[in-house]
Image (cartoon, rainbow, N blue to C red):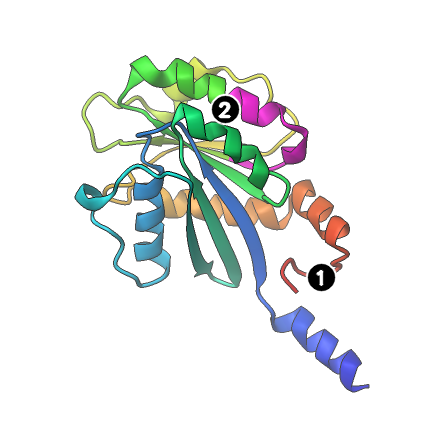
Amino acid sequence: MFSLLYGLWKFLFSKTEFHVLILGIDKAGKTTLLEKLKATYSNLEGLPPDRIVPTVGLNIGRMEVENTKLVFWDLGGQSGLRTIWEKYFEEAHAIIYVIDAACQQRFEDSKSALEKVLRHEDLQGAPLLILANKQDIDGAVSADELARYLDLKELDERPYLFEAVSAYDGMGIKDAIDWLVETMERSKRTEILRQRTGVNGPVGL
């Protein structure tokens, strides 16, 4: 009886945990985004933008949004480091793909790297949040303009959203994360990962 009640308690009160990849080519603002997320959701003072250096390897951020635990994996975006991205695909519930919306000359590189990610079978059905970052900079394109430029063909079978944000001042980030959490909770990708791990209740039990 005790084990049954304990199991029910865990099911009702344990918080769901999701693993989210933060990807994008170098200098897109991924680590700045992670630091802003820490400051927003963890009551921690993130690193100021002028102290953030390019990621070589992996940065991890853990935080809670309402009743959900989020583990963010911020991976280095230099061309030589993108080969390690796929090592994290299998356990990811969703992807945040960050693009410097003020640097149009690198859109093609961003598009190419993203298309490779979306073709990978280990990310089948994973929700995709594409952030048109650096909206605080003059000349940054809107989320709609970025969507038209990328013209991605691999989006039909997964939930996705283009959102204009500024990782520097926080513009748009809360709306983007709210969408991501809600989408992950009801996505087929989450169900696939639950079945794979033999978890029938919320992720992370």
- Inspect this view and state whether residue 181 appears: yes
Neighbour tally class for label 1: few under 14, some 14-19, many 20 plus, Cα within 10 Å: some
Residue 17 picture location, percent across and down: 57, 58
Question: What residue is pinned by disc 2?
Answer: 114
Residue 139 percent across, percent down from the top left: 22, 20
For image coordinates 50% across by 15% down, the residue present is: 151
From the viewer's perspective, tell me whether residue 72 is left or right of residue 106.
right
Q: Earlier in the sequence, mark 1 or mark 2?
A: 2
Residue 22 position (above or below residue 114): below
Q: Amino acid at mark 2?
A: Leu
Tell me how far mark 1 sits from mark 2, CA to CA: 32 Å
x%, y% of residue 127? Answer: 57, 37
The label on residue 122 is: none
Residue found farthest to the right: 1
Whether residue 200 is in magenta: the answer is: no
Residue 125 in sight: no
Quarter location, residue 8: bottom right
Q: Residue 119: give x, y in percent of width and height.
A: 62, 23
Q: Is residue 43 above or below residue 55?
A: below
Residue carrying label 1 = 201
SS at mark 2? Answer: helix
Q: Quadrant of the N terminus?
A: bottom right
Instruction: Look at the numbered discs 1 and 2 and tell me whether their residues touch, using CB distance below 8 Å.
Output: no
* Screen quadrant of the C terminus: bottom right
**Residue depicted at 47% across the width and 62% down the height:** 66
Residue located 21% across and 43% down the image: 49
Determine the residue positioned at 56% across, 52% down.
18
Q: Mark 1 is on which residue type?
A: Gly
Nearer the observer, 96 or 140: 96
In-front residue for pair 184/103: 103
Q: Nearer the viewer, mark 1 or mark 2?
A: 2
Q: Which residues are magenta?
A: 115-128
